[in-house]
Each structure stands twice: as structure tokens, then as C-alpha cells.
Image (cartoon, helix red, strand yellow):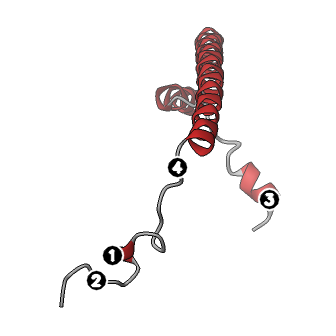
Amino acid sequence: MDPLAFISSYSDVGAGAILVGVVILILTGKLVPIAAHRRELERERLRGDEWKEAHGTSEQGRRAALEQNGALLAGVRIADKFYRDFLPPVPDDTTIPHMSGGSDVAV
């Protein structure tokens, strides 16, 4: 099909058809007034600002949790050093007789 013939077939469209086309575009949301478009852009910008603020709050909470975890880890290290230095070692499978395969039942 020739592109010129395709375009020329629409040259007989009257003003009524154009008006109907514009109304259809408006009703389907493809053609909106500039005020509505700007209003939607502003709404989306505000929504983006809300997300940025929420992200900042989330980051503050994450940093606080990270600092608390660091302090807790330091406490665990101190407790671990205390237990290793001052308490007797914890018996394992080889130092507990009944767990090493021996029997404490008299035969």
C-alpha cells in the first residue's frame, strides 16, 4: 500500500469527525488539559518528596540499629573474654565419658 494513498484517504475527514476524535481522546485520558497535567505532576513530585523523607527516616533508624548492634557486639566480646579467662573450659564429646562411647551401666 502506498503511504500517500493512506494519508489521502483521511483528507475527507470533516470537522465533526475531528471533534468526535478529540472528545474520544479526552474521555480515554489520552488528551488532558494542561492544568490537569500540571496538577498530576505536582502530586507526583510531592509523592516523591514523601518517599525521600521516609527513606531518610528509615536510614536514621538503620544507623541507630547498627550502632546498637555494635555496642551489643562489644559487650559480647567482653563477656566471651571473661568466660575464656576465668571459667573452666566447657567439656566436649571427648571429655564426657558417657558421650565418648563408654557406658556407665554396670555389667
* Residue picked out by circle 4: 88
Q: Amino acid at mark 2?
A: Ser
Instruction: For residue 83, say whether it is visible.
Output: yes
Q: CA distance from mark 1 to mark 3?
A: 94 Å
Give me the disc on residue 3. 3
Q: Residue at x 57, y 27 (%)?
A: 22
Q: Residue at x 19, y 85 (%)?
A: 106
Local SS, label 1: helix
User: Which comes before the other along the chain, label 2 or label 3?
Assistant: 3
User: Which comes before the other along the chain, label 1 or label 2?
Assistant: 1
Q: CA distance from mark 2 to mark 3?
A: 97 Å
Question: In front: mark 1 or mark 3?
Answer: 1
| Cβ atoms at labels 2 and 4 below 8 Å apart | no
* Depth check, front residue: 27 or 43: 43
Give me the disc on residue 98. 1
Give me the disc on residue 55. none
User: Which comes before the other along the chain, label 1 or label 3?
Assistant: 3
User: Quadrant where the C terminus lies?
Assistant: bottom left
| Cβ atoms at labels 1 and 3 below 8 Å apart | no
User: Quadrant where the N terminus lies?
Assistant: bottom right
Q: Amino acid at mark 4?
A: Pro
Question: In front: mark 3 or mark 4?
Answer: 4
